[in-house]
Amino acid sequence: MNGMTNKDRILDWRSESNLLDFKDFLDKITFQPGETIIQEGEVGNSYYMLESGTAKVWKEVDGNEKLDFGMLSGGDSFGEMSLIDDEPRAATIVANSEVTLYKMTRNNFNSILSHSPKVADFILRLMNQRFREAEVRSIKVLKKKNEQLEIANQDLEKKVNDRTRELEDTIKENEKLLKSVLPPYAVAKLLQPNKEMVLDTYNNAGILFADIVGFTELSQLISPEKLIDVLNQIFSIFDVITTTYSLEKIKTIGDAYMVVAGLPGCSDHYEEDMANFAIDLIDTIENMEFDVPKKLNVRVGFHFGKAIAGVIGIDKYAYDIWGDTVNIASRMESHGAPGKIHVSQDAYAVLKDKFHFESRGTIPVKGKGDMDTYFLTGRIEE
C-alpha cells in the first residue's frame, strides 16, 4: 500500500498460477471512481486481488489529517491479514478509476488451502512483504509526527517567548510608570514579594519648598489655558534641574514645588546639591521671559532634619514625607522673600563653609515661635 508501481511490485498475484486456477470461484466486484473499497477501522474477513484500475490508499492521522500511502493498480492485492485474524482495517482504499477485483473470503481461503497448499505459501510471502511495508510506513508516520511535534514545539516556544517579552515589556512599562510618581528605591521595595508597606526614617533629610510669587494675581489677568501653559513651562524646567542634582520631586501643590534630598540615590553631598538647586531655581526664573503682563518670581525655603518618607495608597500610590522638618521647611518658604532663599539655622550650620549667607536675626515663625534664620545669597568660589 505504499505506492508501488508494476516495476517495483514484488508479488503480482496474476503471476501465481495456483491463484489463477481458483479466481473463477471467487467473487468478481467492480467499484466506480470515488467508491470506498475498504474503510479504515472496520473489521474485515476478505482478501482482495486487483485486476484492473487504480485505487488510492490513505490513513487518518490525529482524527482529521489524511496521510497518503500512494496508489494501487492491477496485480496488487490487499487485505490478506483478514484471512487469519479479526483486526480492524489499517487503512482506507478508495477507487480512483473504475476498479475490477477478486474477493477471497476466509471461507474461500480455507477451501482453497485444502486443494493447493502453494496458495498458503504465496499468502505468507505476501504477509512478509506487508510487514516490511508496514515497518517503512511506521517509520514514515513517526518521522512525520516528529516533524509535526518539532513544528509545534517551535511554535509553542515562539509563543512562550513572545508572551514572555510582552510580560517583560509590561513590567518595564509598569516600573517606568511607578518611577514617574515614586522614587526608584521605593519602587524597588514596593515590587519585593509580600511587601505591603514602604516606610523609612531619615535623620537628616533636606526638604525644600518653592513658590511662584505673583501667580495668583496673574490668574486674574490671563486665560486658564495660558496660565497652565506658563506653570507647565516653569515646573518642566524645575524637573530638569531636580534630575540634574539627583534630588527627588515629591509633589506640586498649586504653584508650589516640593523637593527632598537625602534619600537613597542622592549624592553624598546632597546638602550642597540642595543649595545649588535652590540657587538655580532663582536664576532660572529671573532669566526666563514669559508672555504675560506680570513679572514672575520664585520664593524658596529649605531645612534639614529628621523626617519619615514612604508610599501611601492602595489603588493609587503616592510618595510623601512627614515630620516637623516638613513644617519648618514650609515656614522657611512662606516667611521668605521673592527672589530669595530662606533657610533655617540647621541648614546654615551645614552649608556655611560652602555658601554665602545673610543673617535675618531672630524672627517669629508661625507655629514654631522665634527662630534664627538666614538668606542664602550665593556660592563661595574656591
Image: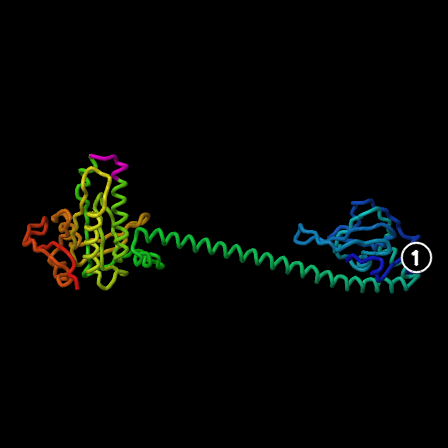
Categorize mark 1 by other alpha carbons within 10 Å: few (<14), some (14-19), many (20+): few
Tell me, yes or no, whether the highlighted magenta stretch contains residue 94.
no
- Quarter of the image where one finds residue 277: bottom left
For residue 67, side relative to residue 180 (left or right): right
x, y percent for residue 130 = 79, 61
Number of residue marks:
1
Q: Which residues are magenta?
A: 221-227
Q: From this view, report whether residue 113 is shown above or below residue 64.
A: below
- Give the x, y percent position of residue 66: 70, 51
Residue 77 in view, yes or no: yes
Where residue 243 sits: x, y (%)? Answer: 28, 55
Q: Quadrant of the N terminus?
A: bottom right
Q: Position of residue 229 (x, y in %)?
A: 28, 41
Q: Is residue 72 left or right of residue 187?
A: right
- Nearer-the-camera pick, 157 or 103: 157
Residue 104 in sight from this viewpoint = no
Q: Amino acid at mark 1?
A: Leu
Report which residue position mark 1 lands on: 20
